[in-house]
Amino acid sequence: MRKIIIGIFISVVGLFFMNGCIRDNSEELKENERRLLEQYLLDNGITQEPTASGLYFILLEDTVGIEPDVTDIVEFEYTGWLVDDKVFGTTYRSVAEEEDIYSSNIVYGPIRLILQDALKGLTEGFQLMEEGEKAMMILPSDLAYGGSTIGIISSYSTLIFTIHLQKVISDPYLHEQTLIKNFMDENGFTGQPTASGLYYFPSVEGEGDLIPSGSRVQVKYKGYFLDGRVFDSNIDSETPLSITIPGELIIEGWNQGIQMMKKGSKGTLIVPYDLAYGAMGSNNISPYMTLVFDMEIVNFQ
């Protein structure tokens, strides 16, 4: 699996903190944004007063749960749109299909953000929520992308979100270890991890010697999250992925795990986040995500 992926789309994760092309600071554009926002509030009967920063926060579903701190990780689903009702992003496949923005390159479903790395308005808004709640947030451009352009989001655009805060994660290691244990129990896996924390469960032993360091390996795989959502696969391809182990562009979980396999081996790797994409994530892979791979070693030299 390549550690660096060059895509032609904005992932639903990257959308929340990426910078874009910056246009000149235009008072005319800012004034137009203010007019459009006022009209949107009027047309939609929104009378909520903004916070001191200018954020409009409207609680849609109230619960009693954990309140996130700025250093926490939040797991959530969302839909985001502009004041002209054009949807620019969503974690819901059904919404993406309805709005004609569906992409097979995106893994739909819950995503994670390190709260202090999010857009300014979202960092503030999430801290007004509790775990399990749903809310609408209206972010003027100075709480979002300002004079930057991100995809269809032009400079000085107000962003509107509906957000379902599903989980507040204060200790990602403990959280992921609990999820790994649950996954193993549900799938009948038993055993201990390696010293690095990697799990390997063979289903077909394979033949010959273990794959040595420096080998060129042909591998077929399916990568998915602990909840079963597939983020990458070449199972249906006639041509296996050919990589050298170890490799700089290969996640460490693969560098270690493949060397536990033989020619013809099949099995499952459970890769903790520190052997995968860590605190940064990558495209469709959120921060601190455990990854699971069903692997088959076709050959190696």
Image (cartoon, rainbow, N blue to C red):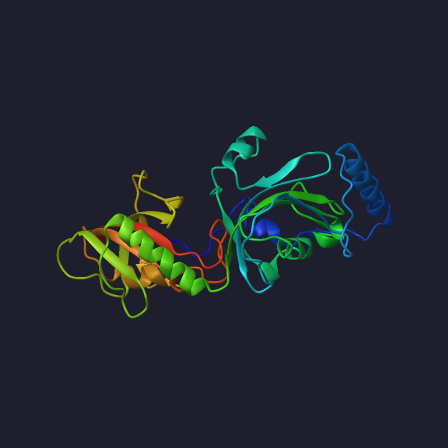
Q: For the point 80% across and 52% down, which residue is it?
A: 24
Residue 12, horizontal then vertical, whole percent: 55, 46
Q: Left or right: where does residue 171 sit relative to residue 124?
A: left
- Note whether 247 is above or below 266 in the view shown: below
Place of residue 259 in the rendered image (x, y in percent of width and height, measured from the top left) = 25, 62
Q: How many tags in the picture?
A: 0
Q: Residue furthest bottom?
A: 195
- Measured as percent of width and height from the top left, residue 263 is found at 18, 54
The spot of residue 112 in percent (x, y) is 52, 53
Q: Nearer the viewer, residue 221 or 89?
A: 89
Q: Residue at x 69, y 34 (%)?
A: 85
The quarter of the displayed image where residue 95 is located: top right
Q: Residue at x 58, y 58 (%)?
A: 67
Q: Residue at x 29, y 55 (%)?
A: 269
Q: Is residue 188 visible?
A: yes
Question: Where 111 falls versus 117 (above or below)?
Answer: above
Say left or right for 151 vs 12.
right
Residue 249: tell me if it is visible: no
Q: For residue 174, which quarter of the picture?
A: bottom left
Which residue occupies the foreground of this view, 138 or 118?
Answer: 138
Tell me: 144 left or right of 287: right
The C terminus sits in image quarter:
bottom left
Q: Residue furthest front?
A: 64
Q: Is residue 185 left or right of residue 29?
A: left
Query: Of residues 253 and 45, which is closer to you in this image?
Result: 45
Q: Is residue 283 above or below residue 96?
A: below
